[in-house]
Image (cartoon, helix red, strand yellow):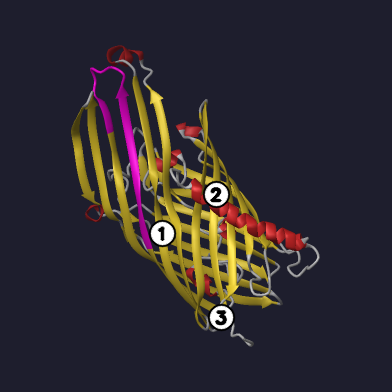
Amino acid sequence: MIRKIEKILLLSVFLIISVSVSAQEGAYGAYSPYSIFGIGDISKEGTAYNKSMGGTGIATRNNRYINYLNPAAVTARDSLSFMADFGLVQNNKMFAQGDITSGNNTFNIYDFVMTFPIWRSSAFMVGLTPYSDVGYDFSSIETNPEIIGNTGNIAYDSFGTGSVYQAFVGAGATFWKNLSVGAQVIYYFGSIDKITNMNYSSSSYRSLNSGSELSLKGVTGKFGLQYEHKLGGDVSMIVGATYKMGSGMKGYSTNFRYANQSSVTDTLKYSVDTLARSGLKFGDELGLGISFKGGEKWSAEFNYLRSDWRKTGIDSAPGFAAVGTSKFTSTVSNSYRAGFEIVPNRNDIRHYFRRCTYRAGFYYDQAYYKLDGNNVNSMGLTFGMTLPIENEYRKYNGITLGVDLGQKASARNGMIRERYAMFVIGFNIHDLWFIKQQYQ
């Protein structure tokens, strides 16, 4: 029975990967009305393992899963193993503002990470993950009878697409058995388009088309450390810290405004600005964490993150600042995250689901900006489990399932309430690559 379950789960991997690849073309990386501001919605980092634990990972040391949230965690591994993680996410959202409601669904790949040993207690990792996403589409019609009486019907439309990704390479090492340190070099790259149209039904007026096309890139570094202290028996305490440097944005911002009438198009504005010359920056980030674990049976963790965007210059930069009447102000982002996991009996050979890992978590995040002086906060609960797929040399293989149920902002102060159910699935790939063969 157990073998049948494992074969079904393994077959599901290939089927889901095939579907996800075909679903990528023309899809939003993410969808949210709040992604119109700044560089869009900053993604929750981490694999499905981290996401189902409330987003924690700064103080996580687990040799069964890749944890790239702290570069020092790469050393928590079997010294002979190769590991990889591939993840998918499906997000369902409902929006409400006054009597207006709407919804949207997206489905995408969210990470691919690999890690392998270098020498003794050191290890290397490389990966590609999303950093931020822009996805929105608003439309409305003019309802003021005085304006319509003079100009005819007017239709407004604003939409945006694009993503910024981060590719990283990192390495870590352990000293004196308890202290681990690590570092990552991170390369940001991507493009974002934000377009606004105003179309007149009367040919006597010129329709307007304006917007920005952003091409972003940048390089930064992230550093981390972890210290593990035995408390007695199988119980240990781990403290961790990370720091990601703020870095300058490079690339270009193309800003345009056209007037169209019949087949004639007039250029009202067209400029190409160099982002490095504008002094724009990505915010820095400080993370602190503490965790407790009882061998391979249970673990609990709490994280705090702080990211400062006040001096990044995006408040007033073309293509980043708010379009319309809302006042967009960058600020300090604060995040509080907690998670717990338990394994009933990892060595139970009769009951498969007792060998599975079960998780739950909570988070409270404050966005890196304010709207009209109001904080944009999100909070949610996470749940998840890992279904093991094991054999002699691939004993840590598994499929991790998770769900994130949360809300962003509220319907007060004229804001849009965003409620969501995000489902994640991660494929934990493990293999022993460095075994010396005893027989030919």
Query: In the rendered image of this protein, does residue 273 appear above or below residue 60?
Result: above
Q: Is residue 262 left or right of residue 123?
A: left
Q: Main secondary structure of the magenta part?
A: strand
- For disc 2, the marked residue is 19
Query: In the rendered image of this protein, does residue 338 appear above or below residue 407?
Result: below
Q: CA distance from mark 1 to mark 3?
A: 30 Å
**Numbered tag placed on residue 293 in the rendering:** none
- Mark 1 secondary-structure assignment: strand
Q: CA distance from mark 2 to mark 1?
A: 24 Å
User: For mark 3, does the 10 Å Cα neighbourhood hold few (<14), some (14 to 19), or many (20 or more) residues?
Assistant: few
What residue span does the magenta drawing correspond to? Answer: 187-209
Q: Amino acid at mark 1?
A: Gln
User: For mark 1, does the 10 Å Cα neighbourhood hold few (<14), some (14 to 19), or many (20 or more) residues?
Assistant: many
The image quadrant where one finds the C terminus is: bottom right
Q: Is residue 128 left or right of residue 272?
A: right
Q: Residue at x 32, y 53 (%)?
A: 216
Q: Position of residue 20 (x, y in %)?
A: 53, 50
Viewer-side label of 3, 2 = 2
Extreme residue toward the right, this view: 350
Viewer-side label of 1, 3 = 3
199 in the magenta segment: yes
Q: Nearer the viewer, residue 279 or 422?
A: 422
- For disc 1, the marked residue is 166
Q: Amino acid at mark 3?
A: Phe
Which quadrant of the structure image shows residue 321?
A: top left
- For disc 3, the marked residue is 434
